[in-house]
Image (cartoon, coloured by chain):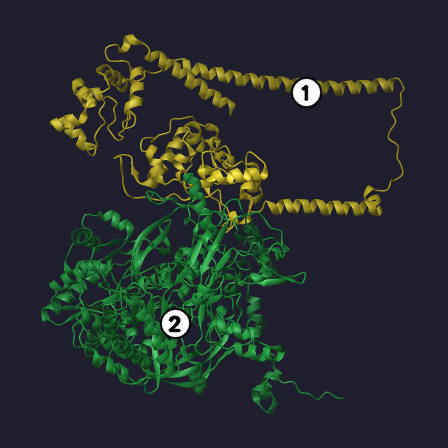
Amino acid sequence: MRKSNLYTLLTSKLLAVVVVAMLSMPQLFAQEGDPAAGKKLFNANCAACHKLNKKAVGPALRGVSSKYDREWLYTWIKNSSAMIKSGDAQAIAIWEEYNKSVMTAFPQLSNADIDNIIAYTDYVAPPPPPGTAPAAGTQVAASGVSNDLILAALALVFTVLIVMLFLVNKTLQKIATASGVELVAKEVKEPRRPLWDAFAKNHFLVFMSVILLLLSSAYFAYGFLMQVGVDQGYMPVQPIHYSHKIHAGANEIECKYCHSSARVSKHSGIPSLNVCMNCHQNIAEYNGEEDLDNGYTKDFYTKEIKKLYAAVGWDEENQQYTGKTEPVKWVRIHNLPDFAYFNHAQHVQVGQIACQKCHGPVEEMEVMYQYAPLTMGWCINCHRETNVKVEGNEYYTKIHEQLSKKYGVEQLTAAQMGGLECGKCHY
Amino acid sequence: MAENKTYWKSADQLNEGNPIIEQLEQKEFAEHIPVNEFLGDSETLDDSSTSRRDFLKYVGFSTAAATLAACEGPVIKSVPYVVQPEQIRPGVANYYATAIADGFDFGSVLIKTREGRPIKVENNSDAPVLGGANARVHASVLSLYDVKRLQGPKANGTDISWEDLNLQVGAKLKALAATGKEVIILTQTFASPTTSKIVADFIAAYPNVKQVTYDSVFESAALDAFEAAYGVRALADYDFSKADAIVSVGADILGDWQGGGYDSAYSKKRVPHRDHGKAHMSQHFQFEANMTLSGAAADFRVPATPTQQKNILAHLYAALTGTSVSGTLGAGMQAKLDKAVEALKAAGSKAVVVSGIQEVGAQQLVLAINNHIQSEVMNANTPRLIRQASATEVAKVVTAVKNGTIGGLITVGVNPALTLADGAAFAEGLKKLDFSVAFSLKEDETALASQYIAAVPHYLEAWGDYEFKAGSFALAQPTIRPLFDTKQFQDVLLAWTGSSQTYYDAIQANWSNAVIGSSSWNTVLHDGFFQTEVTTENNYQGTDLSAEAAALAAASSKGLELTLYTKTGMGDGQQANNPWLQEFPDPITRVSWDNYITVAAADAEAAGLKNVNVANGALNGSYAQVTVGGITLTVPVIIQPGQAKGSVGLALGYGEKAGLQEEMQVGVNAFAFYNDFNTVQEVSIRLADGFHEFACVQLHNTLMGRGDIIKETTLEVFNTKDKEYWNAIPLVSKNHMEEEVTSEGVDMWQNFDRSIGHHFNLSIDLNACTGCGACVIACHSENNVPVVGKTEVRRSRDMHWLRIDRYYSSETTFAGDNETKDNIDGLGDSLTTFGEMENPSENPQVTFQPVMCQHCNHAPCETVCPVAASSHGRQGQNHMAYNRCVGTRYCANNCPYKVRRFNWFLYNQNDEFDYHMNNDLGRMVLNPDVVVRSRGVMEKCSMCIQKTQKTILDAKLDGRPIEDGEFQTACSNACSNGAMTFGDINDKESEITKLKENDRMYHLLESVGTKPNVMYQTKVRNT
């Protein structure tokens, strides 16, 4: 595992160095603009609607300079709608081709900026100079060989040692025989009473062991029964491999962006697919890190995104919804029994409790699992330990003043506020 | 001594030679048990490839497999929306203002929806007309999920598409139009301006079509009278909150009289308000035959047969207008009438007379009286439009259908085949017509007799616009997409007319043009109602009514008179397949799952009719053969205290068979007696064989002078005496000294400090409570209370968390009872007197008392629970942790109020209890915030802790303190009469704190020392 990680890391870094080095060679691209600066501008301004090689909201931009006149492009990018209004045939043709969606005007871009962007869209990475990548490969391979060699050497040393010991022993025996020392064979003793018989005769011991046995089996039986219905660690396979690690971890998307009803409702809610499409309308491919050992390649993730498109009925080719949907049947992980009432809004919004407190390090979970036991004891413990967030909430002003006086504390726990009463969660 | 006794199981055993007995003595089992058939045939057994060992292997394997499978938790799937509608957030309720107008119940309501499905009906308290939702309207949300609803249109019993139906019907309509044969559209009362337009457009396209309005229970006489007096066909509107004196002659003003919805305003004036030290409230005289809610609430109730009512009205008219009529009333009756006249005169223009007599003359007299006294209570300028049917028009249609003289009939939302006296003949005629379409929710009698059935949506899936009374408009909007392949009548009619508009378009266009003026459509839709200024005045064009008065005065009866009425729970029976309503006990008789004939005790004795309580407390009643105009029905009997002698009562709305689950097919169809659309009929009754088993939740006994349950006093005493006199706190003996039970030191319990945070209390005003039962159904709906069925209710296993107890007095007043009890002298006297007191008086006083868990601060139930499943919260609520309960039922035994309910069975997903919780559709009504209890656990009122917690959470989310009135329980929210007030007594400014300090406040069974968090306000009667 280490190995392959190291490998990818090294190759990607090396490649990056090479690419940057190539891009920073100004003499090559001087007249046409700077593709490196263009990349930055492209990502900041264009990437929301355009891709290099594929149609998105707008057309693919690779080789756009060969399709249109440079001057025309300047005017178009700075204010496309004015161009459409003025009746430019080419402009109208594009506008109509892309469902009459108006391209945002970019008056802030200078002609030089646009040149840079065009340079980036025209840029074709030259084939990597031979030797660099394979070099990295051999380097890694070499370190692997050395490990094996050490192991082999060690094995050899141990074998030699064993053989030597055997030989020493043999020599010593020979010496002993030669010097007349008699090697005594073990004496044959009278048969002793077997241990089990002795045990069986000792009533006290038997009694104590039975008690011990009963107690320990009771202990284990209790332990077994208490975990019935506790699904801590439950990690089902989901219909779409959705990685919280990528979304909440790598991309740092706020939990409540998708689970928005956690703010107002008892349910945190599984996001509807239109929420996914807010981002995935533009993110059709996965370009982040891979986990090759588990088979989580870029290709794998991209296929999962296609599953989303199939479910929501998104036609990638034509960039429109087909209307044919197929709701995703997620497997529910966190499931409280019906007789327990839990409200997300109370905890997340009023109590300002981090989602991770109950759901664990979600941002590190490639596959979601149940982190907490979700037992009543677990709830109660937290209610005993957690202070109520009263600051800035006028609801609490009066009751906090009175209760903190009564209990003689500065900070009230949820339990002191009445959070241990049966009827607060069971109705 | 030798034992020569013979033990016998049946009398037949004593006769020797009975072959059956002999045979049974020889054989243990009466029937042959076919053991040999499946084990004795050794050949088959040998041929079988399964040996005994194999069989055991299979058993072992399947047991092991089942055990292993049980170890695995189920995999639960969660399916989110593909595109989530903006306004739906899982777990958050949405409310929509809409309106119900099913032809019988009308009103503006608020619908609570969760995850897109309606789960509860609430009052639209901003809407100014027709009061709050009644029990039936509250229950109507369950009718949406009725499994017996039509799921699509049908033609001659087979499913058809709407396109085909429109094509076929269109062709037939064109053919009929070509021949010029008349087609009648028989509709319910819509009170819908846009529907009227759509129907008018349709008639313009097909001139051979005519619309006739049909009500299941007619108010034709009152409509005719109003038309005669004011030139407008409508019903006078009354505002009882302005009344100081009310005289009702046979009008159940708190029931369904003239469309109902009068109770909220009535109750406002029934709570004594102190003004300059003296309390005032209205005075209510009720002359009636059946015991009604109005009679129970009245200060003076006089039992009077329908004929006597006519005489009374005539004499009342004479006394008020200074004319004279012939004939005399009985002495007692005359005295009561004099008192009523005196009160009316004293109240001046704040007096009103109303009547339920189904005669145009009587209704004309009422209008004349109210005009004569210049009653402010009656308003003729904004008359009600919610009953429109004309008996004569309908009679013509019925004759035409029977004779086949019309080309076709389209029925809309009505079921004449059931609700006509000769419904069967009507259905026969209908079947023979060339063309018939029934717009219906279910496959009822009329739909079954029609060629085409057009399935209509429930009102919660439909658009609608209404004008309940002149100037008071309401809008209805769908709260869920149609569950089935249904279309609204208006949409279909528009299609038949050839219009491309939808009903929604039509409403919006019509309202924008003609109703809302400059107001925004969205605002009006959000509010659900719209009020316009009514400038037209309807002037009284009264004529001389001496002839009518004379006719009424001369009325006399030959025998027993029957008054047909509608029950609080069932109404006209549209929602008969609604288990909540079937199990809802009638407020007066406390009988559920039945209708019955109510008979006065004296009449019952004369006819040999009996009511008996069997060993387990259940009620049995004789059957009676009831004959009206040649039709005889066998009906069970309830002996009704307060029933006017010489009269009997029978509820409409029962006995339907078509489109009803078998469990709901209860009672008899009293519409069979509804001759000439008159609710009063001459009747004869005769004892029939057998006893009927009632599901009655309360015995028909009296309060026995137990003043600590119901406290009642008169306005005079209330005004003149100290609180200690009429609302004394019970005394207990401590150290041989009498002390008030509430005083310090009497209590053995440790007191807890409840002054911090919220402390909830519920106040119930016995003066404002009319017993309407809206709270009971609201509680059902909010708390997922199961329906247990008739046999279980009979075993006292009903699950109502909130019940409304009804008490009778054994003297004519409760005060009289107390006096009788206090005057008991010695053991002998006590035995006889108490025995006598068990029987209610002929005309008892009646009070209603809603009772739910009293949430005692010193709760007896909590101390006896061995597993601490019942515990007390700091906020005053007595908690019940169902998952902790092991079902010992100690708590229920130790509860002095008997409010705990035990789940004897699994009431959901159990075929034995085939009600709404046993099908996927019906379970959609369940409140997702409240757990559905399982078998073997105790349950009870939680003081709607899910609602109080929600209110607290909302405040926390907004970061603000909670205002008074924000805390509500389902019952207090449903009560539009102001009888229930809920709130936080630690909020010193709150309404509930004021009520707690009110002089009228008392606790139920205060002497027990339970310190309840539910309080009652002493009933004051203006006598």
Chain appearing in green on the rendered image? B
State the residue at coordinates (63%, 44%).
A223
Query: Would residue B297 appear left or right of A189 to someone viewing this image?
Result: left
Same-chain check, marks 1 and 2: no
Image quadrant containing the N terminus of chain B: bottom right
- For the residues labelled 1 and 2, the Cα–Cα distance comes to 110 Å
Q: Nearer the viewer, residue B113 or B229?
A: B229
Q: Nearer the viewer, residue A250 or B601?
A: B601
Q: Amino acid at mark 2?
A: Gly
Residue A406, position as x, y percentages in the image: 57, 40
Q: Amino acid at mark 1?
A: Thr
Chain appearing in yellow on the rendered image? A
Image quadrant containing the C terminus of chain B: bottom left
Categorize mark 1 by other alpha carbons within 10 Å: few (<14), some (14-19), many (20+): few
Categorize mark 2 by other alpha carbons within 10 Å: few (<14), some (14-19), many (20+): many
Q: What chain letter is assigned to the residue under label 2?
A: B
- Asked whether residue B141 appears in the rendered view, the answer is yes
- Asked whether residue A52 appears in the rendered view, the answer is no
Mark 1 lies on a secondary structure that is: helix
- Which residue is identified by label 2? B295
Which residue in the rendered view is the most extreme toward the top? A27
Residue B742, position as x, y percentages in the image: 58, 57
- Which residue is identified by label 1? A159
Q: What chain letter is assigned to the residue under label 1?
A: A
Query: Would residue A77 appear left or right of A138 to someone viewing this image?
Result: left
Mark 2 lies on a secondary structure that is: helix
